[in-house]
Image (cartoon, grey):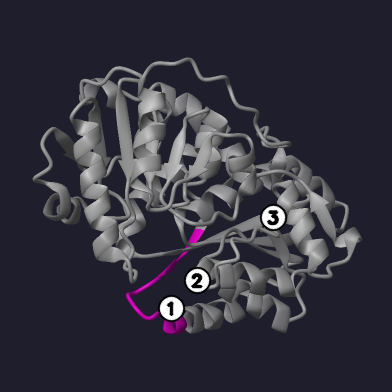
């Protein structure tokens, strides 16, 4: 049976390719080889997610030691060269915009193996973001571009890609959300933290270093203090470790800093929150489908559909705008349910598989 390699490193990439692995296994046309580059700190979460998808025995892992992005990418390229030579895949599918996805795409292109860009055409137009460079490179070497929203089609066409190689399939990460939400709904995390739905705010902080880091942290501290004065504010560990959050914001009165929840528990917390304040782009799509307002402290997004439907608002570092929008949400005023972007319906992986199983 022909093999198809699905690559992930970051959690978001795994959530894009896990539904494909499930569909390919069911259909029996391709044997999916799901590969995840994994640091030791991510092992426990990976094991839980793989089990949730029924993929515990189906993932090849590549251990990743701390290194510079260039060194890590180079090491992964050598691993993928050996792997692709051994299994001779029909297609290689990078799942995200991380170092493993970049390495796999470059090696496949060098070895004349067709690369499938799964979330193609997304552009933030901020080239200071490593993910933006990776998106551009993967799209440039891909033979087939599956786009997840209309902006991807427009961007690729403007960049000169042929129409026949651009296919609108939808967002496979939403397939993962659909799969995991029933488990999340059964989570006991709300009871464990004595929370009632829609009575609390979630702050998801990345705190990645930047020239504006000091200003950014100061603003977040003021915002958390303001929100905590009238609402329960939950600040989970995660991208920023719990200890780092306690050091930065532990003096904020009324703020509840909690240990990093498992991904399924985190989904339940997000779904039940009144709104989410974040400086990361990680959950824009999921919050849109959950119809949870998201105030994103960034200047740009690669997913403009989340802005267009109204659930996600780019607020940058505008303190006044953030406080005003939060006040409207917390006032209890009924908010009309937002639309869900086209084909974010839980069936994107099936559409992708149908095309690839016909030979691309």
Image quadrant assignment for residue 120: bottom right
- Circles 2 and 1, Cβ within 8 Å, touching? The answer is yes
Q: Nearer the viewer, residue 47 or 126?
A: 126
Q: Residues within 10 Å of mark 2 (few under 14, many from 20)?
A: few
How many marks are shown on the rendered structure? 3
Up/down of 243 relative to 71, above or below: above
Q: Residue at x 25, y 21 (%)?
A: 195
Q: Is residue 273 visible?
A: no
What whole-number distance in Å separates the C-alpha atoms at marks 2 and 1? 9 Å
| Image quarter in which the N terminus is found | bottom right
Residue 76 in the image: state x and y as whole percent. Answer: 50, 77
What whole-number distance in Å separates the C-alpha atoms at marks 3 and 2? 31 Å
Residue 235 magenta-highlighted:
no
> Pointer 2: what residue?
130
Say left or right for 254 vs 318.
left
Q: Which residues are magenta?
A: 60-72
Say left or right for 351 vs 180.
right
Q: Nearer the viewer, residue 237 or 296?
A: 296
The secondary element bearing badge 2 is classed as helix
First reached walking from the N terminus: tag 1 or tag 3: 3
Q: Nearer the viewer, residue 313 or 47?
A: 313
> Pointer 1: what residue?
69
Say left or right for 10 vs 260.
right
Q: Residue at x 70, y 60 (%)?
A: 121
Q: Residues within 10 Å of mark 3 (few under 14, many from 20)?
A: some
Residue 67 magenta-highlighted:
yes
Residue 106 in the image: state x and y as whole percent. Answer: 64, 78
Residue 74 in the image: state x and y as whole percent. Answer: 50, 84
Up/down of 128 relative to 329, above or below: below
> Pointer 3: what residue?
31
First reached walking from the N terminus: tag 3 or tag 2: 3
Residue 157 in the image: state x and y as whole percent. Answer: 83, 62
């Amino acid at each position: 049976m022909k093999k198809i390699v699905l690559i992930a490193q970051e959690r978001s990439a795994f959530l894009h390719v896990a539904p494909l692995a499930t569909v390919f296994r069911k259909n029996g046309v391709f044997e999916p080889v799901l590969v995840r580059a994994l640091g030791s700190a991510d092992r426990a979460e990976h094991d839980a997610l793989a089990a949730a998808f029924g993929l515990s025995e189906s993932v090849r892992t590549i251990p990743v030691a701390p290194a510079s992005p260039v060194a890590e990418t180079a090491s992964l390229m050598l691993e993928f060269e050996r792997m692709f030579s051994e299994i001779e895949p029909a297609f290689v599918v990078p799942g995200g915009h991380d170092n493993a996805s970049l390495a796999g795409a470059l090696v496949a292109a060098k070895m004349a193996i067709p690369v499938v860009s799964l979330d193609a055409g997304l552009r933030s137009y901020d080239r200071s973001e490593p993910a933006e460079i990776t998106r551009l490179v993967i799209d440039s070497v891909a033979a087939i571009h599956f786009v997840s929203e209309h902006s991807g089609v427009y961007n690729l066409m403007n960049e000169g890609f042929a129409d026949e190689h651009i296919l609108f399939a939808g967002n496979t990460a939403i397939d993962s959300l659909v799969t995991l939400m029933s488990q999340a709904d059964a989570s006991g995390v709300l009871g464990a933290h004595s929370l009632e739905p829609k009575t609390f705010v979630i702050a998801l902080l990345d705190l990645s270093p930047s020239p504006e880091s000091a200003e950014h942290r100061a603003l977040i501290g003021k915002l958390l203090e303001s929100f905590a004065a009238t609402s329960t504010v939950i600040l989970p560990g995660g991208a920023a470790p719990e200890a780092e959050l306690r050091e930065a914001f532990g003096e904020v009165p009324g703020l509840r800093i909690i240990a990093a929840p498992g991904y399924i528990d985190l989904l339940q917390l997000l779904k039940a929150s009144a709104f989410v304040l974040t400086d990361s782009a990680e959950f824009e799509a999921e919050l849109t489908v959950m119809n949870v307002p998201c105030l994103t402290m960034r200047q740009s997004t690669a997913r403009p559909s989340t802005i267009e439907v109204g659930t996600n608002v780019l607020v940058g570092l505008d303190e006044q705008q953030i406080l005003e929008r939060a006040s409207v949400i917390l006032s209890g005023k009924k908010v009309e349910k937002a639309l869900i972007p086209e084909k974010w319906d839980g069936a994107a992986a099936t559409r992708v598989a149908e095309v690839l199983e016909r030979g691309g």
